[in-house]
Amino acid sequence: MMTASSQHQSITIPDFIRLKAEGQKLSLLTCYDYSFARWLSKTAIDAILVGDSAAMVMHGHRNTLTADIEIMRLHTDAVVRGAGGKCVIADMPFMSYRKGIPAAMEAARELMCAGANAVKLEGVDGHEDVVQRLVGSGVPVMGHLGLEPQSMHRYGGYRVQGRNLADAEEINRQALLLEKLGAFAIVLECIPASVANDVTRALRIPTIGIGAGAACDGQILVLQDLLGLNADFQPKFSRHFSELGAAVLEAVGEYDRAVKHSEFPAAKESYE
């Protein structure tokens, strides 16, 4: 049984900027469900992102666009109940912050009422007013630049961004704007390490990298990728820190064999 005494101290939103100033790295992971959130509550991971990648990882879709506010609210609520007080950040889904301030505020309200400590949204141009209104209303905002998965059709797929000077300068411009608007951190996805280094050095707020090199102030990975549960998908920036997928296959195989050889359940697993 997992108890509160087994949980690590949780950080808060203001701690993100403090930890950058102190030169301490931040570790984040995605999580989409109660069971894995309970395990993460026992670790030293700093924060959990309930990503719209749930549409792909948990629901089998080809991209993140199908993750609507109801899906994000459901997953956020489940993770918060298992996270044991960990800082939980929830993705605002596709188009939810592009329909004007009232719609964006309502989407953010649902995620915050589900227990999130902050929301994350992609890009900045065209919804600067939304970022400013959210921050001004007490909703902490994390930005997301570089490869923005909700805009994957614009790129012609999932492609590294910022490889030429103009694109690199544009990422830097948007990062500075997000900081000015009040964002507390920015995810940098799939950009050259040198570009991420320049952005990180230009900002007071921390950068969280995923495929953006080691100079970022923190890193984030998809939990299932870290655990080796996506055997047929391993992007360049990811690493299997475990091969849990192989362990699952072995355990299920052993169960199947035990059932079919009448070895399970045994007497100790049966009631009298």
Image (cartoon, helix red, strand yellow):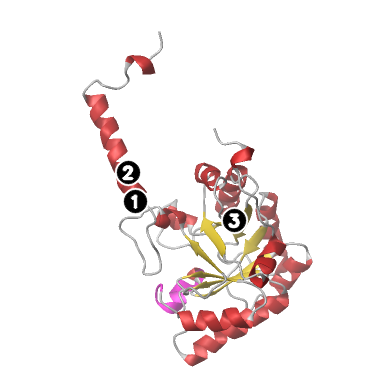
Q: Residues within 10 Å of mark 3 (few under 14, many from 20)?
A: many
The residues tagged by marks 2 and 1 sit, at their Cα atoms, a distance apart of: 7 Å
Q: Is residue 152 a member of the stretch shown in magenta?
A: yes
Q: State the residue lying farthest toward the bottom.
A: 165
**Nearer to us in this view, 247 or 106:** 247
Q: In this figure, which residue is indicated by the disc labeled 3?
A: 69
The residue range painted magenta reads 150-158
Quick one: label 3 or label 2, which is nearer the N terminus?
Answer: 3
Q: Are marks 2 and 1 in contact (CB under 8 Å)?
A: yes
Q: State the residue lying farthest toward the left.
A: 261
Q: Residues within 10 Å of mark 2 (few under 14, many from 20)?
A: few
Element assignment for label 2:
helix
**6 is higher (above) or lower (below) than 48:** above
- Label drawn at residue 79: none
Q: Position of residue 63 (x, y in %)?
A: 43, 63
Q: Amino acid at mark 3?
A: Ile
Q: Is residue 54 a member of the stretch shown in magenta?
A: no
| Quadrant in the picture for residue 235 | bottom left
**6 is higher (above) or lower (below) than 203:** above
The residues tagged by marks 3 and 2 sit, at their Cα atoms, a distance apart of: 34 Å
Quick one: label 1 or label 3, which is nearer the N terminus?
Answer: 3
Q: In this figure, which residue is indicated by the disc labeled 1?
A: 243
Residue at (44, 51) in percent of width and height: 59
Q: Position of residue 38 (x, y in %)?
A: 55, 43
Q: In this figure, which residue is indicated by the disc labeled 2?
A: 247
